[in-house]
Amino acid sequence: MKKENFDFYDRTSLKSYNLDKSMQYQLNALDSLDVFTRKHCENVAAITCRLCEYLHCSKGFTEYCTICAFLHDIGKLFIPPEVLQKPGKLTDEEYAIIKTHTTIGYEMCMKDPKLRPYAAGTLYHHEALNGTGYPQGLTKKDIPYEGQIIRVADEYDAIVSKRQYKTHIGISDTLKILIENAHPTPIKSSDALAQVVNNAQMGKNNPAIVRVLIKVVLDDTYYEIACSQDYIDYLEDNIKRFEKIEKYYNKMLQSKTEAKKNYYSEYMKLYFKENENINNFFNIYEDYKSAYNLRKQKIDTLYNEVKIIKKLKV
């Protein structure tokens, strides 16, 4: 498709206050979802929007696909909370209940004229290219492109996000799982010759979309590093300021006359900011140093993730 200039802050923006009234309606449908599922839907829509951009999709398709992604889990409104929010591993029976959210969501959308155009996201986002997905076990030729895109965004967020029933893992490890799912999956059934012939070279995920996801994740990681670096620069400036305060504080303690003590005390005040004083500056100073160490550690971790991600091959 022809690449169009894409403005993240126009009507396709994920910020609801930037969306027109027709889009507001679709997004308001999520209001009844539990907080975890709603956040997941927002994340998947954000990733889907970025994937469409990197895949050079048209602006109209990007907007359509983004709304489909917002609504993809709307069927979970009718999944019992004790199943949906279960902290432990689901039983086979519970997993079967969870899987019905695809057809329930599809039926919900089809019954509402304003949601009907976006029903594909609800129905197809768990279908796999090799036919191992649900609810219909479709293969690549029968799975709409929007379903293939949303599947990748959904799988990425479900793994990398900290959910009530998930353990957080690193972004590079998450990408490795998606890459593995883009590789051919051996067919165990010996009598499924036709399926073997048709799907032997397919995995669950579209490799082209997974490649684009890697680019999106890299760009987002670099952006996060840049934001963290800005904060580190701010912390460093304040730490240097407190180092000067501490120097004058020590001089004040070592002074033998009141005049000298007052002299250094006044010097300290020149460096104090609002709500800082001689009684609390040590605690604030320690807070700055602690924040700096944590943020520096985070940046080091992100740079390490970048090194790993750049070596990944789909």
Image (tube, helix red, strand yellow):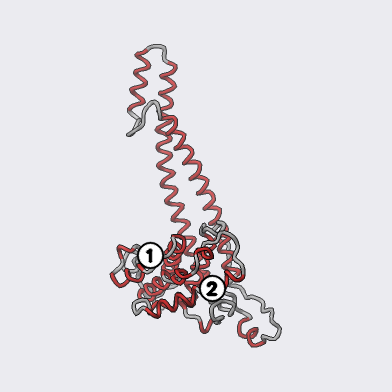
Q: Position of residue 313 (x, y in %)?
A: 58, 67
Badge 1 crowding class, 10 Å Cα cut-off, few under 14, some 14 to 19, many 20 or more, is: few
Given residues 292 and 67, the one toward you in this image is: 67
Horizontal relation, residue 216 to residue 182: left or right: left
Q: Residue at x 43, y 18 (%)?
A: 253
> Can I make out residue 194 in this image?
yes
Regarding mark 2 in the picture, which secondary structure is present there? helix
Residue drawn at (32%, 70%) of the image: 25
**Residue hosting label 2:** 99
| Residue at the extreme right of the image, as rendered | 190
| Residue 50 at x, y percent in the picture | 42, 67
Q: Is residue 225 left or right of residue 270?
A: right
Expressed as whole percent of the image width and height from the top left, the position of residue 273 reads 33, 33
Query: Relative to 289, is 187 above or below?
Result: below
Q: Amino acid at mark 2?
A: Lys
Residue density around tag 2, few if under 14, some if 14–19, many if 20 or more, within 10 Å: some
Disc marking residue 31: 1
- Work out whether residue 86 or residue 223 is closer to the camera in this orientation and state it: 86
Residue 53 visible within the image: no
Q: Is residue 238 above or below residue 309?
A: above
Q: Residue at x 51, y 65 (%)?
A: 84
For residue 64, side relative to residue 83 (left or right)? left
> Which residue is nearer to you in this view: 262 or 71?
71
